[in-house]
Amino acid sequence: MRSTGFRRTFVALSVGSLALALTSCGSGDDGSAGGKTRITVNCMPPKSAEVDRRFFEQDIASFEKQNPDIDVVAHDAFPCQDPKTFDAKLAGGQMEDVFYTYFTDARHVVDIHQAADLTPYVKELKSYGTLQQQLRDIYTVDGKIYGIPRTGYSMGLIYNKRLFEKAGLDPEQPPATWEELRADAKRIAELGDGTVGYADYSAQNQGGWHFTAELYSQGGDVVSADGKKATVDTPEGRAVLQNLHDMRWTDDSMGSKQLLVINDVQQLMGSGKLGMYLSAPDNIPILVKEKGGDYKDLALAPMPGGKGTLIGGDGYMVNKKASPDQIRAALKWLDHMFLTPGAGFLGDYARARKADAPVGLPEPRLFTGAADAKDQQVKKANANVPVENYQAFLDGNQSLDMKIEPPHAQQIYSVLDGAVSAVLTKKDADIDQLLEDASTKIDGILARG
């Protein structure tokens, strides 16, 4: 899952719009148009995202000018990938030539034989060798390359510096352990007037997502290394639920309203009534631009616990039906749009700053070596947010184990939602039984493949 942005917002399509999507996405031919190689691509920002849409169109136009033999046909999407239609488009042969995927999709798309093998062509992707190895590995299956990473994120702890100060806490020393977080949350909640020390999600699969992140931070895991057995019924899993239970019922630091989802928690933080919650850096501009927050009050720390954090992100794969010329065109397009340091749709920081888009948020680095140095130099020169508020996050992440979401993530999150919501809504919740039941259900999901 990803927390914000049109690229990660889940909406349902009506039957009519699904039918339209299935008949309008694929190229339906060999990719040639008037002597040009034509590729269809998705994840174009919708017209409602006016600035992003303009940038995307500008970048496609500049690409086609530099590559007059390639015609790019972009399809907009809200969201870029809807889980309700993704498999149907793949199975129906109607997926774009170059299509967006979450990290967790990569293996699935390969397993159902819908992705082109890029291995013979990837040497033509100029940027490939500069990308972080752990991100490249996500799209590498059995030694073959099936996709190209585009962005990444990692979970951390957003906190309100002003409330820390008001509660007599040092805003430059965010909690490094769950014990410290519990103590700080209690101090903040004691400010009264509806102030909540710590909030967490517990519905719509989001509770299971955060359970996973908290389990990683404790050094635990959701499934075994071979992906065959649940590993939530462990001391680490018990510690996650016990901590939430105790903050809710013993400390009264999580407020009385539960079954929260992301918008509820963002609203609390933006209104200045919440001390801390877990999120990725992309929440910060949402808190400021949509929820009433202030950049100077919002800081980011690494995940408490010091052992691990959940990472996610996205990339592009190429349709198995694509011709060699289309694959080559796709890789050129990816280089131009997303993988050139300091340029392109995501990397033109000077353009983003002029449009009043946030520059300087601590997203995980995509590049390495000289490419990374250039990207960071351009980013720093155009920063328009208080980057000092995120230094603890950047420093702390260096020592954390970066762990991707589990297989069958959404199904597993649905199961874990029940455990999280139970401890937050029932004072007498049986944690041992909740974990045993969750483990049995997850084993069933894994057994079905």
Image (cartoon, rainbow, N blue to C red):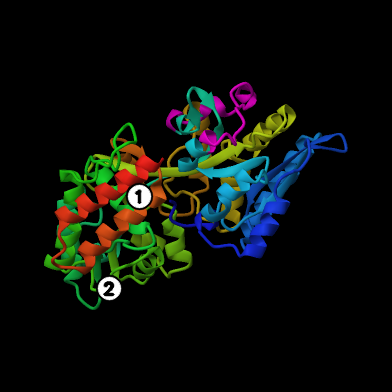
Residue 24 showing in the rendered view: yes
Give, as a three-letter code, the residue at label 2.
Lys
Depicted 30 relative to depicted 143: above or below: below
Residue 31 locus on image (x, y percent) = 78, 37
Give, as a three-letter code, the residue at label 1.
Ile
Closer to us: 164 or 136: 136
Residue 130 lies in the magenta-colored region? yes
Residue 157 showing in the rendered view: no
Residue identified by numbered label 2: 257
Residue 5 locus on image (x, y percent) = 51, 57
Residue projecting furthest to the bottom: 193
Depicted 411 relative to depicted 192: above or below: above
**Between marks 1 and 2 in the image, the one whose residue lies nearer the viewer:** 1
Q: Residues within 10 Å of mark 1 (few under 14, many from 20)?
A: many
Q: Is residue 139 left or right of residue 58?
A: left
Residue occupying image coordinates x 32% and y 40%: 397
Quarter that holds the C terminus: top left
Magenta range: 109-134
How far separated are the C-alphas under marks 1 and 2? 24 Å
Residue identified by numbered label 1: 412
Residue occupying image coordinates x 76% and y 43%: 28
Q: Residues within 10 Å of mark 2 (few under 14, many from 20)?
A: few
Q: Is residue 127 left or right of residue 65?
A: left
